[in-house]
Amino acid sequence: MQKTDVSLFHLWQKCRSGYLTGSELRALIEIVLRLSVAYLKFKQRQGLHLTDIKDNTKHALESIALDAVADLFERDEHNCLIRLKHYFQSLQEPIDCQETALLHLRRLVTARTRQGLYRIFRERDPESAKLLRNLKLAAEQSDTLRTAEDIRGILIYSGADAPPPVRMPTEPMMGQIYRHMKPEDTVPQLLQKMWDILNADASAPFSLRLHDVITMSAMRCSSVH
């Protein structure tokens, strides 16, 4: 990315005005797509099955990235890139070098890609998207559980100021959770049952990835049929 980065500071200055030439816009789109694809690859390494979201083609990640970040390049009636202009003009921290410009652009692209993934997921599987939203809300409203988000994803944990190490449920634990689940359980009840079972034999504080909680929750759905 070194060759592209040479013009990044210049592109940032142009983004603040909202107007880029054709060649500048193409260079910016290339950088944004590469940052978005890098984030998608990172999510794949975390266990997110992105190829289930769209057709498993050679350019699947590029297609998802383009879908996720396309609205960053929205223009108004004066042909101004309004979203990019607003974002870069609203920054309080001065951008005086390429590294800082790249840092802020990466934050923007990562946030937009994450939102795009959720939108694609919601369109493809609205029931699972609803479960994801309700589980996160249940954790946030719990008296004992907390949520945080870092490079490991959205984490659910209890007590600690910062999320402790992630715990992966074993197959015996999954079986125990399955036996205690009831189809009529509400989402908060379901989450609390999972936590209590996993916490019963825990020797140290731990976090659960929301992704794993959704996987366990799917067992309840399958038991209904």
Image (tube, rainbow, N blue to C red):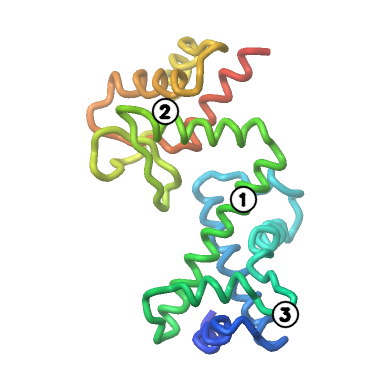
Question: Dot 3: few (<14), some (14–19), or many (≥20) neighbours within 10 Å?
Answer: few
SS at mark 1?
helix
Which numbered dot is residue 79? 3
- x, y (%) of residue 219? 57, 20
**Nearest the camera: 88 or 152?**
88
Query: Who's the residue at 51% across and 14% down the image?
Result: 185
Q: Which residue is mark 1?
A: 117
Residue kind at label 1, given as amino acid type:
Leu
Residue kind at label 3, given as amino acid type:
Asn
Question: Dot 1: few (<14), some (14–19), or many (≥20) neighbours within 10 Å?
Answer: many
**Nearest the camera: 159 or 45?**
159
Q: Residues at badges 1 and 2 in contact (C-beta under 8 Å)?
A: no
The answer to whether residue 199 is above or below residue 43 is above
Which numbered dot is residue 169? 2
Residue kind at label 2, given as amino acid type:
Pro
Query: Who's the residue at 61% across and 20% down the image?
Result: 221
Query: Who's the residue at 64% across and 13% down the image?
Result: 224
- Tell me how far mark 1 sits from mark 3, CA to CA: 27 Å
Q: Quadrant of residue 145?
A: top left
Which numbered dot is residue 183? none
In the rendered view, does 189 fall on the left or right side of 20?
A: left
**Nearest the camera: 170 or 9?**
9
Question: Dot 2: few (<14), some (14–19), or many (≥20) neighbours within 10 Å?
Answer: some
Foreground label between 3 and 2: 3
- Tell me how far mark 1 sits from mark 2, CA to CA: 25 Å
First in sequence, mark 3 or 2: give its number.
3
The answer to whether residue 116 is above or below residue 125 is below
In the rendered view, does 113 fall on the left or right side of 197?
A: right
